[in-house]
Amino acid sequence: MKNAYAANIWKMNVLKFLAGLHFMAGVIVPFFLTWGGISLSEMMMLQAWFVFSIFLFEVPTGTIADYFGRKHSMIAAGFVGMLGCLMYLIKPDFWLFAIGETLWAIGATLVSGADEALIYDSLKKMKKEKTSKKVLGRFQSWGLAGMLVAAPVGSIAAGMYGLPFPFLMTACSFLASGLLAFTLIEPRFKKKKHEE
């Protein structure tokens, strides 16, 4: 079973990389202004709504992770993030973009904290929790590596196939992260009984 928990660690690194592949990051402004046909102030409103949505959904989605398990929360994050990306592609419309921002925020909050908790619990099962700082630091760097790779690749793809294409690529990376999350093993611990 220790091998399964060790596999969780490298799977989570790959998952973080996939979730960090925001191919649309380099073209987000021209996407909204040119393809989306919205104003700069409307774009800023969407970004403000995204930040507010994260604040709004952080506690409820944390409850989902606690109740259904961190693995299931990360599976849901991948699929909800994918749906968020696809909302932008339906047609240029401010309200569809707002729904996309909301879904993207829900996806972000579903994984927020659940990913690191699953890694820590896996290390605990392997009796290696003392290495958690190093392992979690490496884990975060995988997400940054995904962003570093995705922005230039997405910009090139947008130049070749159009501004919406990087959103489709990002949706695929979210889908891949959700599918990978299915293979994780949820660490379980016996609940201690409390006596009066």
Image (cartoon, rainbow, N blue to C red):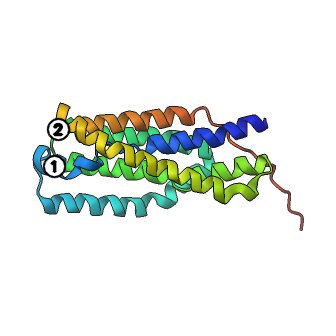
Give the image location of residue 104, x and y in percent.
37, 48
Camera-side residue of 99 and 165? 165
Using the rendered view, name the quadrant where residue 63 is placed: bottom right
Q: Is residue 111 left or right of residue 49?
A: right
Disc 2, SS: loop
Q: Residue shown at 18%/37% (left/top)?
A: 159
Q: Residue shown at 68%/53% (left/top)?
A: 120
Give the image location of residue 100, x and y in percent.
30, 46
Camera-side residue of 146 and 60? 146
The N terminus is located in which quarter? top right
Disc 1, SS: helix
Give the residue number, with chain letter if any, for mark 2. Answer: 91
Give the image location of residue 108, x and y in percent.
44, 51
Q: Are marks 1 and 2 in contact (CB under 8 Å)?
A: no
The C terminus is located in which quarter? bottom right
Give the image location of residue 61, x and y in percent.
51, 53
Q: Is residue 40 visible?
A: yes
Give the residue number, with chain letter if any, for mark 1. Answer: 30
Q: Amino acid at mark 1?
A: Pro
Using the rendered view, name the quadrant where residue 175 is placed: top left
Q: Is residue 146 left or right of residue 112?
A: left
Q: Is residue 111 visible?
A: no
Give the mark, 1 or 2, whose residue is nearer the N terminus: 1
As drawn, 179 above or below 139: above
As drawn, 177 above or below 47: above
CA–CA distance in space, label 1 to label 2: 15 Å
